[in-house]
Image: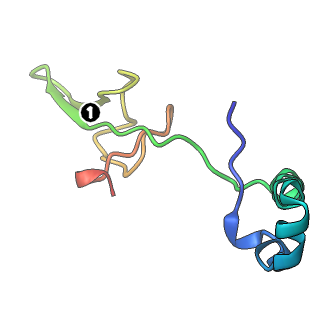
Amino acid sequence: MPRYIDADKLPITTVAIQPYAIIEKPYNAEVVFAQAIKAAPTADVREVVHGTWIKHDDGYVEYYECSHCLKRAPEDTEFDFCPWCGADMREGGE
C-alpha cells in the first residue's frame, strides 16, 4: 500500500538546505531529503469511491440500492454515503 505524507508537515530545515553543502557534496541534499520524507508523518487518507442510488419500485415497496456494492439502503432514505461500502453518493463526486 502506498504511503502518503503530509507535505505541510515536512521540517522547514529540509527546504532550507545550505547551498555550500550541495556544491561540496551533492549527495548530501538527497540524503537529507530522503531522511525527511521517511520521517514525515503519514496523512490520513482513503480511496474515494463514487456511486449512485438506484431507485427500485416492485409495486409494493420502494427502495434504493447502492450502484457500487449493490446493497439496499435502509428504508427509502437517500444518504450522502453508502452505509456499507462508504461510496460517495453526492452529485458530481464532491
**Compared to 33, does 49 lie above or below?**
above
Where does the image place residue 14, in percent across and percent down from the top left?
Answer: 82, 71
Where does the image place residue 15, in percent across and percent down from the top left?
Answer: 76, 74
**Badge 1: how crowded within 10 Å, few (<14), some, or many (20+)?**
many
Q: Residue at x 42, y 38 (%)?
A: 49
Q: Which residue sits furthest front? A: 24
Label 1 sits on a secondary structure element that is strand
Within the image, what quadrant is residue 76 found in?
A: top left
Q: Residue at x 37, y 52 (%)?
A: 80
In the picture, the quarter occupied by the C terminus is bottom left
Q: What residue would you read off at disc 1?
A: 64
Quick one: 37 or 58, which is closer to the camera?
37
**Compared to 21, does 89 lie above or below?**
above
Within the image, what quadrant is residue 33 found in?
A: bottom right
In this image, 74 relative to 59: left or right?
right
**Compared to 11, does 85 lie above or below?**
above
Within the image, what quadrant is residue 88 found in?
A: top left
**Looking at numbered disc 1 in the image, what kind of residue is underneath it?**
Tyr
In this image, 64 relative to 85: left or right?
left
Quick one: 86 or 25, which is closer to the camera?
25
In this image, 84 relative to 61: left or right?
right
In this image, 34 relative to 70: left or right?
right
